[in-house]
Image: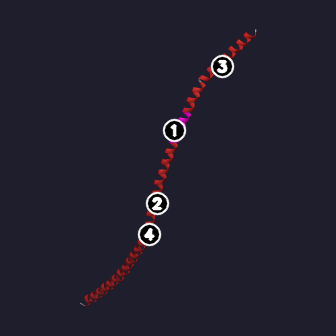
Amino acid sequence: MELIEILTGVLLLALTALSVFTIVYMGRATKAIEKIEKDVTKLVDESAPAIESLRQSSDQLNELVESAKDQVDKTRWIVDEVVARAKKVFDFERRVAEKVDSPAPSIVNNLHAVRDGLSSFWNAMKR
């Protein structure tokens, strides 16, 4: 029986050592987890203002983009209006040119004919 008692004593010492090791290891693990928790809490606290700043920047950027879209739309409308008016002016100019150019040669021919007729009349009168 002595061997069993000795082995039982060794086994109890081993279990005691294992229990002490487990308690020490769990204490260290708990401290590490607490440190990680503090770091995460600190990270969250420090990142909250940065996230808020990013949100505000995003909102301002969205407003700027909307304003730029409005300006582009207004500019596009102005360009379309200028193009339409320029087309009207060119069309008007073309119509005026057609109206002026069409009768001008016939008027000039008629004036030449009248001049030639008057010239012939004066020549005939001089004789």
In the rendered view, would you say 2 is above or below 58?
Answer: below
Distance (Cα) linking label 3 and label 2: 74 Å
Quadrant for residue 3, please give it: bottom left
- At label 1, which amino acid type do we have? Ala
User: Local crowd at mark 4 within 10 Å, few (<14), some, or many (≥20)?
Assistant: few
Q: Is residue 127 left or right of 92 when viewed as pictured? A: right
Q: x and y percent of residue 111 in the render?
A: 66, 19
Of circles 1 and 2, which is in front? 1
The boundaries of the magenta stretch are 80-91
Quadrant for residue 36, please give it: bottom left
- At label 2, which amino acid type do we have? Gln
Residue underneath mark 4: 49
- At label 3, which amino acid type do we have? Leu
Residue underneath mark 2: 60
Q: x and y percent of residue 58 in the render?
A: 45, 60
Residue underneath mark 1: 84
- Give the mark nearer the N terminus: 3 vs 4: 4
Mark number, residue 111: 3
**Circle 2: element type:** helix
Q: Nearer the viewer, residue 93 or 63?
A: 93
